[in-house]
Image (cartoon, rainbow, N blue to C red):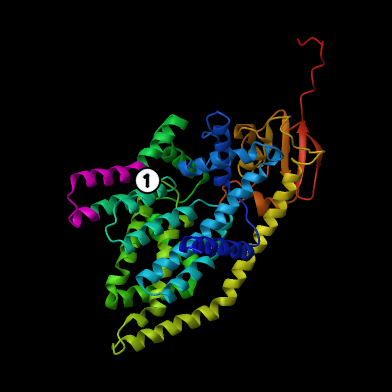
Amino acid sequence: MTRSARLAAGVGALAALLWLLTGRGLVNYDTLYSLVWGRELAQGALPGFDVPLAPTPHPLGTLLGVLAAPLSLTGEAAVHGQAAQTATLVLAFLALAALGWVVFALGSAWLDPWAGALAAAILLTSRPVLDFGARAYIDIPYLTLVLGALLVETRRPRAGLPVLALLAVAGLIRPEAWLFSAAYVAYLLWRGERDARRLALLCAVAASGPAAWMLVDWALAGSPLHSLTGTRESARTLGRITGLGAAATTAPRRIGEILREPALVGAVGGLVLGWLWLRTRIRLAVVAGAVALAAFCVLAAAGLPILGRYLLLPAALGAILCGAGVFGWRLLPAGHPRRRLWAWFGAFVLVLFVVFAPAQAGRISDLRAALARQDQIQDDLRALVRDPPALVRGSCAPVGVPNHRPVPLLALWLDLPAEQIVSLQGRTIGLGEYVRPATPAVARDYVLDRRDLDRAIPPPPPGFTAAGGNRSWRVYMRCAPPVEVGSEVE
């Protein structure tokens, strides 16, 4: 078996273990919209980017939707889109496993395999990271691509084009990669790169990410800045925290939620001890972390929302620094005066991991329970649209929902434009169907978010009558009577 085949098999096996660890996966709101938009493009229509509270349309996510479109346009998948969701989840867990391998490889290259293994274990057992991976957030592939670029640069200093190519692809997922590309070109110039043709090529690749993103926005939404303005508007509507001042107070807390106490202690120790005695080995991690935090602050200052998943990159680098804090002493010469002290610190951090292990196991158990509960509620919703006698068919359009969260899911399952799935928060409909949570517990566990400004579940519109439902959902309808053939319509 070749090295590439062994690597692929290892990533596949790790993806299966991560699936078992979380119990299941659920495609998140943003990625569901990517599947809906990709299906619309595959059908020859412009995607509905202007739907109220639509997420930011990431070009690579939309491309994923186009590639998955055949799965939601044939056979049974035309009813519920489940095949496209399943394929997306398979890719999501493979990306999560690939992230673990890249972190291990980086830790091994910068330090040693023990440090790399610890860093990968920290990241892959973090509840937020598992949550983002199991819900198919595109931030996981973005993180893998950026760390992959760092790995290429580590193995081939000043590699140039391969590094920028990975960052360009990452720049089709998140705009922070653009700052990494600019910083890398500046670094190459600082290190003496003067070949005019090579510099022109490197600059072109570095600029391809933002250029492609703006061209896609221009072609599909009519404005090259649609993603920026749309994200700002959604952040204001939802009351999301933003601004440079909020970034300074939020970033440490969110990184702490990802790494938790033992890894934070180890990362701080690894940063201090490594900078004193292994500076050349951790320099790239420190610089990359600084650029990642700077990019986060730039987005916050631009009015974009401050979300924990935007800090996955500095958290991943912190996990590697924790590996340095625990095992960095092994890289010092046998007679080094600080070797014993560093080893004692590493042992202390390992004891902290053991002490906090039950709490970490509890967090993963809570994640499994939350995913299972939401999967059951989603299965009940799917039962209303799939097998006869299905209640929700979309034939009595529009379909009303309690808020914006079920919109892309029902649009995908019913093969309808997202515009025909209407949130009844702040508005009503005169005709159509209304799918409402059957209990407050369903609303709390599946529809509502603790950050929502409006947490009320709208009642059925006037004239709508109960048509049925199940343990999780109730359906209300008011459909226009069919016009008989041959009758006159005045």
Q: Residue 43's image quarter?
A: top right
Position in image of residue 240 (x %, y %): 49, 49
**Neighbours of disc 1 within 10 Å: few (<14), some (14-19), many (20+):** some
* Span shown in magenta: 187-209
Counting every numbered tag in the picture gives: 1
Residue at 35% x, 89% y is 340
Camera-side residue: 282 or 228? 282
- Please say whether residue 44 is one of the residues in the magenta stretch: no
Camera-side residue: 460 or 352? 352
Position in image of residue 129 (x %, y %): 52, 61
Position in image of residue 368 (x %, y %): 65, 63
Camera-side residue: 430 or 307? 307
Residue at 42% x, 47% y is 304
Q: Which residue is mark 1?
A: 302
Residue at 79% x, 17% y is 483
Q: Residue 132's image quarter?
A: bottom right
Which amino acid, mark 1? Ala
Position in image of residue 5 (x %, y %): 50, 61
Mainly helix, strand or loop, the magenta region?
helix
- Please say whether residue 193 is one of the residues in the magenta stretch: yes
